[in-house]
Structures are given as structure tokens and as C-alpha cells.
Amino acid sequence: QTVVTQEPSFSVSPGGTVTITCGLSSGSVSTSYYPTWYQQTPGQAPRTLIYSTNTRSSGVPDRFSGSILGNKAALTITGAQADDESDYYCALYMGGGISVFGGGTKLTVL
Amino acid sequence: QVQLVESGGGVVQPGRSLRLSCAASGFTFSSYGMHWVRQAPGKGLEWVAVISYDGSHKYYADSVKGRFTISRDTSQNTVYLQMNSLRGEDTAVYYCAKRFDESGSYYPAFDYWGQGSLVTVSS
């Protein structure tokens, strides 16, 4: 059973930089997993931020960026703003049509 | 503009069935793969199923395989999720989501999501 791991929570100061990671319970994340990142605020549908490791979705500010850091996918927010306070999820494509989401990271901006 | 509108949710007893619909508009429905993603109350997102643009390929999460069936009707611009043998752990908001491109790939990159439909499985 493949488990996709994320930090449960993170805190960042306004204007600061935060990196949220997305790993595997066994093995390393590479671009072959097409890491995708989503943002969700309470009561709302998710929004896709980054797909295929580092491609921003239309309309997503460039303070959001994606990468591979070591053996994990990473979402970096540079110059965090108050309205970035949300839940962030990653998803990895396992092949054979199957995708798995991480457990989510709750980001607090204070 | 692109719209995805889910319907069909509600309260259902364990072991019973329910069918969700996702009515799509504002794009060429027959060109895009479509996914279902769910979220249990207070929990994270869970990928459920995907159907290819032409309906020829369908894939499911292990948690729903053999119980759920995804399908699409191009004449109605609608994707469905037939849910059988429902369990308490299937209680969730179910979102349909549109693949962002026509590449035929299955990785879960979406440009539009529906507003969600709540399914509650309870006796």
C-alpha cells in the first residue's frame, strides 16, 4: 500500500518563504510521478496550483513554485500572503491510471 | 465558461446504491478525461476514479474497485459515478474534475472542479 506523505502543518510569517514536501512511504518521488499540488480553503472546492512537478496552472501567482528536492516533490511559497492560509495537497501518479493524494498540509500565515 | 455541476448525492443506507452525475458545459466534453475525487468530512482528498476522453479506459482506487463504476455520456455531456454496496467510509463530498488538456494522460492535473455533492451513508 503506497502512502504519500506530507507535513501535517506548517506556519509561515507574512512575506516569508515556506516549502511543503510530498514524499513516498517507500522510494523517491521523481518527475515520473507528475507531482501535482492543490490549494483548498474551507468549504471550497480545491484549486490546482502546480502540475507535472513545476508547471503553474493558469492564473496562479508566480510566488508558488514546484520542484523536486532530494527524494520528494516540493511546493514553495515565496513571499507568503495572508490569503495563502489554506490546506495544501499533493497527488502523485502511480501509473496504470492510478493516482494517490497526500494527507494534506495545513498552512498558517501569522 | 466551463461549468461542472454535480448532482445525485444524499443520504443512503449501507449496502445500497447511488448514482452521481456531473453535467459539463463550456468545453468540448468528448475531448477530455474526467476524474472523481472525494473528501470525507474533516479529512483530506482521495482520488476515486478516472475515465478517458472516449470512455474506453477506466481506472479506480483500490478502496472502490469492484463497487463503483465511472461512465460518460457524450450526448448528455455528463460523467457518472455509480456507487454500489455503499459503506460508511464512503461518506464524503464527491467532486468531479476536468483534465486540463487533451493529451490523454491520466495524471490528476485539473483546470476545473465541480462544487461537490455530499453522499452520506448511514442507517
Image (spheres, rainbow, N blue to C red):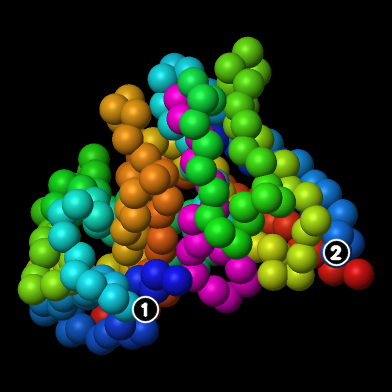
Q: Quadrant of residue B103?
A: top left
Residue B24 higher or lower than A16, as above or below = above
Kind of residue indicated by mark 1: Lys
Q: Residue at x 39, y 73 (%)?
A: A3
Task: Answer whether residue B52 is magenta in the image.
Answer: yes
- Seen in the image, is B104 located left or right of residue B94? left
Residue B84 higher or lower than A29, as above or below = above
Residue A53: give x, y in percent of width and height.
17, 54
Residue B48: give x, y in percent of width and height.
54, 53
Badge 1 marks a residue whose secondary structure is: strand
Kind of residue indicated by mark 2: Pro
Q: Residue at x 56, y 59 (%)?
A: B62
* Residue A32, label in figure: none
Question: The C terminus of chain A is located in which quarter?
Answer: bottom left
Chain ID of residue with mark 2: B
Badge 2 marks a residue whose secondary structure is: loop
Question: The N terminus of chain A is located in which quarter?
Answer: bottom left
Task: Answer whether residue A34 is magenta in the image.
Answer: no
Mark 2 vs mark 1, CA separation in Å = 32 Å
Residue reaching furthest to the top: B75
Residue B61: give x, y in percent of width and height.
53, 55
Q: Residue at x 41, y 44 (%)?
A: A97
* Residue A106, label in figure: 1
Which residue is disc 2 drawn over?
Answer: B14
Nearer to the camera, A53 or B104: B104
**In the image, are marks 2 and 1 on the same chain?**
no
Q: Quadrant of residue A4?
A: bottom left
Q: Is residue A16 visible?
A: yes
Mark 1 is surrounded, within 10 Å at the Cα level, by few (under 14), some (14 to 19) or many (20 or more) other residues, namely many
Residue B71: give x, y in percent of width and height.
62, 31
The residues colored magenta run B39-53
Q: Residue at x 42, y 51 (%)?
A: A98
